[in-house]
Image (cartoon, rainbow, N blue to C red):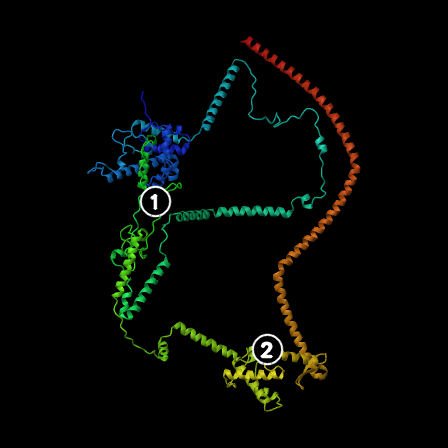
Amino acid sequence: MRIVVKGGVWKNTEDEILKAAISKYGKNQWARISSLLVRKTPKQCKARWYEWLDPSIKKTEWSKTEDEKLLHLAKLMPTQWRTIAPIVGRTATQCLERYQQLLDEAERQENEELGLTGPGDEAGPSDDVRKLKPGELDTDPETKPAKPDPIDMDEDEKEMLSEARARLANTQGKKAKRKARERQLEEARRLAVLQKRRELKAAGVISRIREKKKGVDYNADIPFEKQPAIGFYDVGEERAKTYESSIGKSRMEAEGKRKADKGEDERRKKQKTASQESNDKYQAAREAQIARLKEADKISARRKLDLPAPQVGEKELEDIVKLGQSGESTRELVEEGDTSTQGLLGNYDTIGSVHNLRTPRTEQGEDNIMSEARNLRNMTASQTPLLGEENTPLHEQQSGTGYQSATPKHVANFTPNPLATPSHGGAPGVPFKTPMRDTLSINRTDGISEAFETPAERKYSERSEKARLKTGFQNLPKPQNNFEIEMPEDEADEIAQVAARKEDAAERDARIAAALAEEERRILARRSSAIKMNLPRPVNIDVTGLLQSLSFKEKSVEEMVENEYVRLVVHDSIHYPLPGATPAHGVDPIAELPDEAVDAAKSAVDAELAASMGVPGANSDAVKRALLASIETQLDAIPSGELGYSKQAQAVVHLNELDDKEKMEYYTFRFATIKDRLTNDAVKSAKQEKKLGIKLGGYMARKEALSKRLSKAFDDVETGTINREAFGLLALNEREAAPARVYKLEKEVSFMQQRERELQSRYKELEMERRRRQEVIEGLEEEEAERLNEIAMAAA
């Protein structure tokens, strides 16, 4: 008998069979899966999948972050690899192998430091330590790559492969096989019964065959028949039940759905069908859009370059540049003066050497991975504390992974500032320190820190400093009292120097714009009061007719005023023409006066007007108020009644003082004025009505809807009141006629019950008679069959 030992190295064929079997049977039926592999057990198949073949297993190189996390978790949870594996993102076997590899690497480094490796290459890398030697068996082959398939496979492997291919290709389940088997048994049973009947018939034995139908015979039986209970049915619950009338129900509840509601339901169904069709129509476009969005999410999910924040920002760099510029400008000012003061300022533009110009490197950090690996190796190799020996020596480290959390601690390195002058004293921690730029030897360079000085050393250093200062003052040169007096230059030269400076284009444009604005303001201020106040003016000017229509009482004053008035009108028609007017030609009759003369004339007119109004020295506003009060007083003094303008008197007088022609002109003018006002008011009212219609249209529509609802509610209330009264009268009539109807119905029910009892007894008697006769018929048939059998046997 051949003995097959299960286990050993996995082959590529076995891996492919295992993956195909898992895709068919799942990850729970390992016994069935292992039946396809002759040399593997269910436990080995499961371990192979979860340790190597699972697509979620990460097989890339270990990163520094993963190593730190692995060592930190191994320090917190020793030997708990099943717990550590999901946190690190690897399998438990991978974590254990990497942990042992790191410990071997730490041991190799320690041996190299102590010189224990020898002069040759006898000690190889840490990976070679745990490799299998010739003749050794791998105790964990499930975590190793598969062995490639040979060109010529043996018979066992070919048989295993063909059987697995056949079993995996079989897609027919147990139910289909059972159904086929049942059909074959049914067919065999039918053939056996048929052969038996033929043999009995050939022997002269006639047997009655009752065909059994599958299911229910609807011709003979009543499907789902439920026999009524024996006795009479208790109708007490039905008698106690009350049947409510439709009093108090709305018409909508009584009538059911309206036609409009049914139409709305049909419209919604059509709309839903149309939306489904449109969804099917644009399904391909929607799927393409979803695919593009997923692709965009994948692109955005890529890891970005994460750099630390800069230690020296834009503001600090700007301050450094400004300090350098200010120092340079101060040095230039000192160099322009006397040479005796040049030694009081040092030169800090450049740094002493080329090496000092480079940014000083940060202090070399410790390798946390190797330090933690050495500590863990020492703790693993330590003896039990019961022996009482010394504690396990651990490597001191400034920034380890710590014990605070489940993730290792990280300390960010900072780039040192090369422009910061270090504090005096103190030895540098690393080479290439920031240089001490002290040209005047102000800072101490003895290398002794003040924090570690004794009182005697501090006193000695102070005395040395005082002596050095005294020696320096004594070595100063003697003063030279040579003075030169210089007179200040003329201010005209300074103004000329300022004028000689070329004007900037922006300043020139601003100056020209300000001058133009000032000139425009002066031109607007020189306009007449009629233009400023936008008063009505004549379209066309007839200078000759205008002068003839004016009458002069005092030629010396009135004539001059009227002539100036005419010139102002002509000036305004030339410089500020109305739209549609014929432009006036000729020379402007008014010469431009200086602003001082115009202001003086206005002041004189205001002073004279104030004196005439009895308020001398008042301002223009007070004069206007006094003038308006005087006009109102004069109007109040006129007798009550309508006023009109008289051309003869050239004044506003009472209507009784006008003749018929002037009254007709007055009333005609008044009618035209009122008509124009009415027309303007009608146009304005139409505009306002339109605006209010737009603004209040919604409220008006809402008011109409509420009015309709109110009228409908009133109609419903009226209809309900009528129905309530009608049904109330009907209920009153029913209460009177109900006892008679109930008595009549009870009498009919009792009669029916008596009739039913009689029919039930009659039915019972007939049923017994039918059964008795059925038994007699069956007995006769049996006797007839026996008689026929005896005759046949006698004949045989």
What crowding class fits label 2: few (fewer than 14 Cα within 10 Å), some (14-19), or many (20 or more)?
A: few
Q: Name which residue type carries label 2.
A: Asp
Instruction: Give me the disc on residue 399.
Output: 1
Q: Which one is in front, 309 or 790? A: 309
- Residue that carries the numbered disc 2 in the rendered image: 621
Q: Earlier in the sequence, mark 1 or mark 2?
A: 1
Q: Name which residue type carries label 1.
A: Ser
Assign the N terminus to one quadrant of the image. Answer: top left
* Figure check: 195 above or below 690: above
Instruction: Give me the disc on residue 564.
Output: none
Q: CA distance from mark 1 to mark 2?
A: 87 Å
Q: Report the side of 601 relative to 76 (left or right).
A: right
- What x and y, as percent, mark residue 4? 32, 24
SS assignment at label 1: loop
* Figure check: 526 above or below 152: below
Q: Quadrant of residue 153?
A: top left
- What x and y, as percent, mark residue 747? 77, 29
Q: Is residue 721 visible?
A: yes
